[in-house]
């Protein structure tokens, strides 16, 4: 078990489905978060199925993060060129 505070109970609504870690007292609102937790916090005791679920969840997480980075970069480029064009039009 880790030394970090266990405040996960606050993030799981009472009437929502809960996903309990079988290796510690952590509780999660989403199965994907439980899969990521098991693979990162308990890598030596997970089963093959849990390890496969972790790899799948981690890959989905990286795919979503990669997409977010591309979208953020696109927005920044559009803002930059938008301000550049606005300054060229208004500044003259």
Image: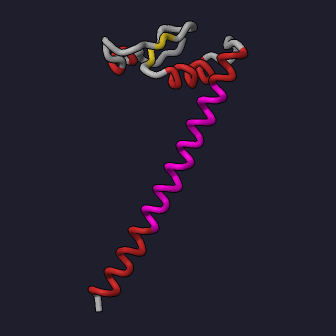
Q: Is residue 20 left or right of residue 44?
A: left
Looking at the image, is 81 positioned above or below residue 26? below
Q: Is residue 42 above or below residue 81?
A: above
Quadrant of residue 53 in the image? Answer: top right
Q: Residue furthest left?
A: 90
13 relative to 69, above or below: above
How many numbered discs sit on the rendered protein? 0
Tell me residue 8's x, y (percent). 39, 18
Residue 16 in the image: state x and y as whole percent: 36, 15
Instruction: Identify the coloring.
Output: secondary structure
At a point 68% along the width and 20% down the height, the residue shown is: 51
Image side of residue 84 versus residue 20, left or right: left
User: Is residue 19 found left or right of 38 in the rendered image?
Assistant: left
Residue 63 forms part of the magenta stretch = yes
Can you say which quadrant of the picture contains the C terminus? Answer: bottom left
Q: Is residue 22 above or below residue 92?
A: above
As for residue 28 lying within the magenta part, the answer is: no
- Identified at 58% across, 36% down, the residue is 60
Comparing 4 with 38, the one in front is: 38
The percent coordinates of residue 57 (x first, y second) are 59, 29
- Residue 34: image x %, image y %? 53, 19
Range of magenta residues: 54-77
Residue at position x 61%, y 32% in the image: 58
Query: Who's the residue at 53% across and 8% down the image?
Result: 24
**Main secondary structure along the magenta-highlighted residues:** helix
Quarter of the figure with the N terminus = top right
């Amino acid at each position: 078990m880790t030394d970090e505070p266990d405040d996960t109970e606050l993030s799981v609504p009472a009437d929502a489905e809960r996903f309990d870690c079988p290796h510690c007292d952590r509780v999660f609102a989403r199965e994907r978060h439980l899969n990521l937790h098991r693979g990162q916090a308990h890598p030596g005791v997970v089963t093959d199925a849990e390890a496969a679920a972790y790899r799948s969840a981690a890959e989905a997480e990286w795919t979503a993060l990669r997409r977010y980075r591309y979208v953020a970069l696109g927005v920044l480029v559009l803002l930059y060129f938008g301000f550049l064009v606005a300054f060229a039009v208004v500044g003259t």
